[in-house]
Every structure is written in C-alpha cells, then in structure tokens.
Amino acid sequence: MDDLDGDSLRPVDARLWGKCDGLPGPYPVVCHLIDTAAMAGALWDAWAAGLGVLRADVLGERIAAHMRSLVCFWAGLHDIGKISPSFQVLVDDLYQRLVTESPEYGEDHAEPGLRHNEVTQWVLVEIFRELGYRADDSVRRDVGHQIAQLLGGHHGRFCPAIGRRSELRAPRSSRPGIGKGVWEEQCRAHAVVLRELTGAREVLHERLPVPAAIVVLGIVIVADWLASQESFITARMPGPTWTASPDELRAHWERAVADAPRVVQEAGLGRGLLADRTFKELFGFDEPNSLQASVMKELPDLVNGPGLLLCTAPPGDGKTETALYAAGVLARASDANGLGFCLPTMATTDAMHKRVARFAERALLGDAALTKVHSMAWLSSGSAGDAAAGAADGGEVITDAQASTEAAQWLHAGRRGLLAPLSTFTIDQGLAGVLPVEYNALRLMATAGKVMVIDEAHSYDAWMHALLLRWLEWLGALRAPVILLSATLTGETARSLVEAYMLGAGHTISQELRPRYPGWLFADAVTGTVHSPREVTSERERVVAFETVPVCRGGDAAQPEHRLAVIRKLLENVVDGDRGCVLVCCTTVTEAQDTYRHLADWFRRVEESGGRPPALRLLHSRYRERDRAAILDACERDFGKKGARPRTVLVSTQIVEQSLDLDFDLLITDLAPMALLLQRSGRCQRHRDERADLHHARRPEWVGSQPRVIVLDPVDERGEFTVPEEWGEVYDESLLHRTSELLRERGGEPVKIPGDVQELVDAVYAENFATVTPLNDATARRIARADARRLADEAAQRGTVKLVAIPSPDDGRLRNLHNLIETQVEMDPALLTTRLGADSERVVCVYEQRPGEWTLDEAGQVPVPGMKGRSRVTRDQARVIAEYMIPVPGRYFGEGTELLKTPPSWKKNVVLRDWKLLPMRRASDGGWYGRMRPGRVTYRADSGLQLI
C-alpha cells in the first residue's frame, strides 16, 4: 500500500461523515479515526507499563517494540466500516448530496441491518492481507482476521468469524452492502493516512495471544469513547473549506496528539503508583502483628513480578492492612497501574472504600482517582450519588444509542471505577468479565493492570466459586497480581484457587497444598513456584463459647420455646441492667423487621411500666441511602474501637458480619453454616483477646469470662432440626444441618480461635460426616439426602458455569473471538442477575402531596427534582435523588406493581434512567403506602421499606 503522499491513491474524501447526531454539523470519519488513534496513544502511555501481558516476554521483542504504533493504527481503523454505503445512507440528506456530487458512490447499494462494525471486520481482512499480515484459508490461523475481528468487536460484541475460504480471499465480493470501487479506494486511502500518521510499519506474522488481544481491544474501546465525547468533537470541527489535504490531516493529528493526554487525565484514567513506605507511614501504628510482620519480612524476597498471595486469618487479625501492604510490594515488582479491592457485598464495599481511601492518601505517588463500584453502582449514597452526579456532569458520547449509554456508564457513572487506577467494587463486577455479556473484554482489561485484592474468598456458593476460578485463570493469563483473603477456607478450596491462577499463568501445581491457619502462601506466576505456606501465631487468640438454643417459629410468640420468646429471655440482662451492647443477627430482611417490631413493642411496654429499656436499632439493606448511611455511621461511631458503647440492641441481617469493625458484648444469631458463624463471631467482643480488652471499663458484669455466641437452632414441633420456610434458599440445608449437629455434639465446648477454626470448617464439609460427629440412623439418612441434593446442586452449578462462562484463556476455541460472547448455550440474562446478586432494582418513593405534586419526603419539604420539564437533572439534584434511593429485589416488580413513568429529565441521566418511581399515597390512617408485586408497602426511617 502507498504512503500518505502516494500519487496513485485517491485523496481522502472529507464528505464521508463519521459522527453527526447532536453536533453542529457532520464530522468527517477521517477526523474521528485520527482522534481515536491519538487517544489510543495517550491511553497506551498511561496504561501500557502496568499491563504485563503486553510486554516482550509475552509478545516477543520485535512486536513489543512496535506495539504502541500498531495499537494506535488499529484503534484508528476501528470505524473504517463507516466508509460503506450501508452506513453513509443512515443520514439521507448527506448521502444524497454525496451521490449527486459523485455518482460513483451510488453504484453500490446499502444492505439494511448491516452494522458498521461488521463492515470493519470484513474490510480489514482484505486490508491486512495487502499490508502483509500472514494470511491463511482458516480463520483459526489467519493473523489479519484476528485483528479485524478484534476491531469489529469495539461495540462490546464480537462478530461471527468469516467462515468460507472464498470470503476470506475476497470479502467485498462476498458481502453485499460493503461497497466496491470508490468505497474500496476510500477505505484504502483512510488506512494509508492512519498508517503514515501513526508510523505503524511493522506487520504481524503471528496471532496475538488472546489475553493480549483482549487488552488491546479494551484500549481501543476506551479511546473510541473518549474521542467520541461531544465536547472533544465540537472543539475540533473542521471549517467549511476543510478538504482533508495531507497538511490538514497532519495538523488534525498533531492537535489530537497534543490534546489526548489531557482528556485521559481528566477522565481519571491515569496510574496509581504505590510508594515504598513503612508500616507506620501507611497505617499510623508502629508494631505490625505477627501476620503483618511475617509478610513484611518475607514476601519482598519471594516476589519477582506478578503472583498470587493467599492469606487466611480470623476476623480482626489485620488481613486488610496485610493485603494493602502486600499490594504495594506486588505493584512495585510488577509495575502495576493501581489497586482494585473486591468484596462480596455492597455494604462491605462501602466500609472498605473508606479504609482504602485512607491508605491511598498515604501510599500514592501523585494523584489518582479512587472510585467505588457496586452491583450496578447504586447501593450507597456515596456511590449512587457519585454515579448519578457524574452522569449529570458527563457530556454526551456521540455514537449509537446503546453504545452511548454504555460509554456514559464507563466514563462518567456506574462502571467508571473499574477503569480507575484505584477502586473498590463488588465481586459481580469482576465475575461478569468471564460471562458472555457485552463489554466483557473491557472488564477483563480493566482488571488486568491492577493488583486485585479479593476479600472474603470463602463466602461464595458453588456457582460463584466456579466463576471465581475462571476469573483467576484469566487474571493469571493477564499477568495481574492477585491477593486472596479469607477468614475460613477449606484446604480443597484453597488449592483450587491457587491452581486456577497458576494454570492461567501457564504453570501447573504438582505438590499437595494446604494453607496454614492463620498464615499465608505465595505462588509466583513468573517462575511457577508455589512457596511453602507460612504459619503465624495470632495475636488475637481467644476462646469463644458457642451455645445452641432450640427455637421454633409460628404459633404463640409467648411460648417459651418460640424464637422471639427465647430472644427476649436472652436480652433480659441488657434490658434490666445499666450497660451492654447486644447484636441479634437474622437471616432475612423480613425476619429482621419482624424481630425489630416485636422487640420495639416489648421495650415500649417496659417503658410504660416505668422501666428504662435499651436503645433499639435495625440494620439491613432495604433503606433509603441517607437512612442506611446514618445507621451505619452511628454503629461505627458507637460500637467501633473508640465507641461510647451506649446500652443498645442492634437487630441486623448478615450485612453486619463482614468488613465492619464492630464490637458487641453478646451475639445472638440465627443458625448459619459453620464458616459464616465463625466469621460472624468476630463481632462478639471483637476488641477483646486473652491479653487485653479495649472496652473493659464499659463491659457489663454479665458478659462472663469468655465471649458468648448464642446460636438459635431451628426445630419443628417435635424438636427436630428444620430449615424455616421463611429462609427460602439463603443457606443450604445440608450445611445448616451439619453445623447444627456439630454444635450440639460439642455441647457448648468453647471454640479456640484460630486454633479450632480450620478443623471445624473442614469437619462441616467432611465427605463422611458420620465419622466426625455421631449421628442416629434417622439423622444420618436425612443428612445424607440433604448432602445428595447439595452435591447435585453444586455439580449442576459448576456444570452451568462450564456451559455459560467464556472459555479459558488458552482454549483453542478462542481462535474465533466470537466465542467470547457466544458460549455453548445461550445465557439467560436472569441467570446473571439472580446468581450474581444483581437482581436488586433501585426504587425512589415519591409522595403525592396534591394531585401532580410529588416530593421525596413524607413531610412535603423536598420536591422531586426533574419531575416537570425536560432539562437535565443537575449534579446537585442527582445527589439529592440518590439519598432517597432504596434497593429492592427484582422480584418485587411485575404484575400488581404501581409505578410512575420515568420523567424525561431522568432519562437523560444514564444512572437515573434505570431507577423506578414508586408512588406513595396517604391513607385514611395517616400512613403512606405504595403497591409492589408482593402487596402494599410502606417506608419508615427506623425500619426501612416493608411489606404490610
């Protein structure tokens, strides 16, 4: 192919448009291609050093040396498919003028439904062959086809491979709507311009490793979005006399190259480099504990680059600080771009975000964006407000409607944190990268350049664990350093996690692997060495008394064996005394609300009879964000390390058991699997160990010599174990029954933490449970049946993951990139939402004060922003709305739900457009009620959204 000034080549036609809607005029496609190429260069400069999969040891010295110019060139080519009749015809007046002025453009006809990204793939196969990329009659070996298919996937979905030999050899003759003649000449002319400007003289003779290709595509997608921002385009719209001459093209390129780094920086897409600082400088205290000291002393000598650190220790043993310190070690050794901290729930992400932010203030070299990403980025007032406000501020991305929405989410709203150099996010955001969802490649790229910390690695079911294994494979292949944290982990689970990561990195594990508890191990992705596990002593060794109390449900709550009556009896000390903090942990939101109402009635009667009951609080996820944030803040203030510890009973769901540094004098909890009970016990006298008690002066006398955890063991009317119907499928019956039997057999024998933890966790999962705990025949048969159901369900979940998850990074099927988006069976979108916990919708209760007058509050003081008119919701208004957003299960919507239409102004905000408005109307009793699928609902600041 000729150079930019080649005499035989038709000049670039400036009349061919690339962007139009929302602009003062058509923007030439050549300008957008040049802009995107320049933006890719700026992103390369910002990210490439931290993307290990793009280095010479992966790509080879020759290709790695030219990779920057190649990526710029490829990024510029992403929209070359717009140089086709099927795209140009989309703006009729521009197309008719083009054909009138140059009739040769009308010799080929458009093909309805042919998208420009498909044309890009077909056109580039031919162009890359002409450039000298190695050709082959099979798409599995054709180098140009891989890059062409890669660039055809820039809207988040790969196009099917070009299957026939004849199509590979002559794409234009095989696909109507692409265009020949002048269309072909213009494609070549645009490609030559890009090649000359980017200096991409090198050609590929070997296919890129698939992980490297994924990272390249991620850079191309983000470059395209940044270059498609309305503000960026309008500032460089060519004038009416612009003809795309060589001098004008070079001037446009030089300006784009000069401006691109600023655009990347303003988008918060730089690097987050972690300084080598002392433990005190990072965390503010002098003496690291034994776990932290061991990692500080030994890990740096083991690290050669990326690898996996597995750390297991009881709650409160400083795993978070250990992980953050180790992240710095791994980041510096592998030159990573930043840190991603991944947690299982949205509430834990809130709490961790604050800790990571404090760490970042002390550890960062320079400035880096720190953002928080939840499931759909909505739970907390902070993240929801940031997302909605960011969407309010973010300019339009000029592309088709679906891609524009996605781009706005990534650049300005809910998913921006995945691209940011420092972020905290929920596990579903990472796991979605290994599912066949749109932009899964971008999710993988976004996590490739960071040290990934995955907390609570023990807390996932078989489905999510299988997805986690596949994600770890990809992280290993992407050369991303990983840190896994867990309070309780079976040996088999630990091995599977390490093995998956090392397999992705190209290594196998031959030796038996069993973690030490507490302790850590490091698997080196560079050498393939899995270093011997290090065992450490816990400086928070303690003995916890686990007592089981059988409880029944239904019938008269005054009966002594009724769950509520048992809870009342256990609370008598704090009700009658002058101090004490008690946590009552419930399995479901509904049961927590019922328990709270029952205790509130009791406390009211106590007060009416002259008594002084303790304060009563409720914590779960189904609150307005402002109310939930206030409850959490009050809990951390009152029951944290420096808390005043007012006499209180807190009723909560499992939201309280992870990543919250709270200390209660007594824990009363519904039965849960052993691993979770041990985790939950970390909230009982958390700041007390065998040496000292931080809250000794405020402990009530009735606490005794050991922390006490009262487990409410559910039984039926015959006194036999049963899983309450109200719990649904929150926990597996097999694990609950095994835990119940194990605790009963121990007869209240105290549990040594950490000494007994590993044994207890392994015991619950023992293949032959009868060898662990004596069982009568009936119980053994019942557990065996439940085990069979559990094992069958787990096998089914793993089988489902094999069918719906994307292939492993070294799977030969990925020679056709379409298999990253089309797996063995089509995935039902509901499977993703229900399994990954993303089924929660966002609802805003709006109160009808008068016909047509709606407010966010019952008192009528806060009008709903954007209910009238069509102007965009402002940043401040978006934050106000976010404070009143409530998460609810997706099953709450459907037949019987009454909702208001989404206001036009909300539809202009990429976050608010998905939030639902629930009308609340005042009833004759003075209360406010709405209607959802389960029935009537109301909202109270103390108890949240609840069914009536």
Image: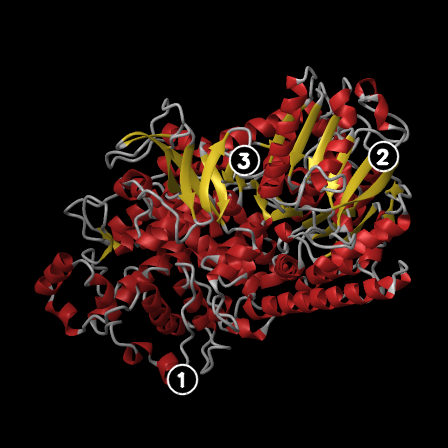
Residue 510 % position (x, y): 81, 67
> In the rendered image, which residue does mark 1 sit on?
165
Q: Is residue 804 left or right of residue 322?
A: left
Res 321 seen here: no
Which corner quadrant holds the N terminus? bottom left
Residue 618 % position (x, y): 61, 32
Residue 793 % position (x, y): 66, 66
Q: Earlier in the sequence, mark 3 or mark 2?
A: 3
Circle 2 or circle 1, nearest the eye = 2
> In the rendered image, which residue does mark 2 sit on?
540
Q: CA distance from mark 3 to mark 2?
A: 35 Å
Q: Earlier in the sequence, mark 1 or mark 3?
A: 1
Q: Are the residues at dot 1 and dot 3 in contact (C-beta closer than 8 Å)?
A: no
- Tell me the amino acid under the disc marked 3: Ala
Residue 363 % position (x, y): 65, 32
Res 287 seen here: yes
Q: Which mark, residue 368?
A: 3
- Tell me the amino acid under the disc marked 2: Arg
Q: Is residue 3 left or right of residue 373?
A: left
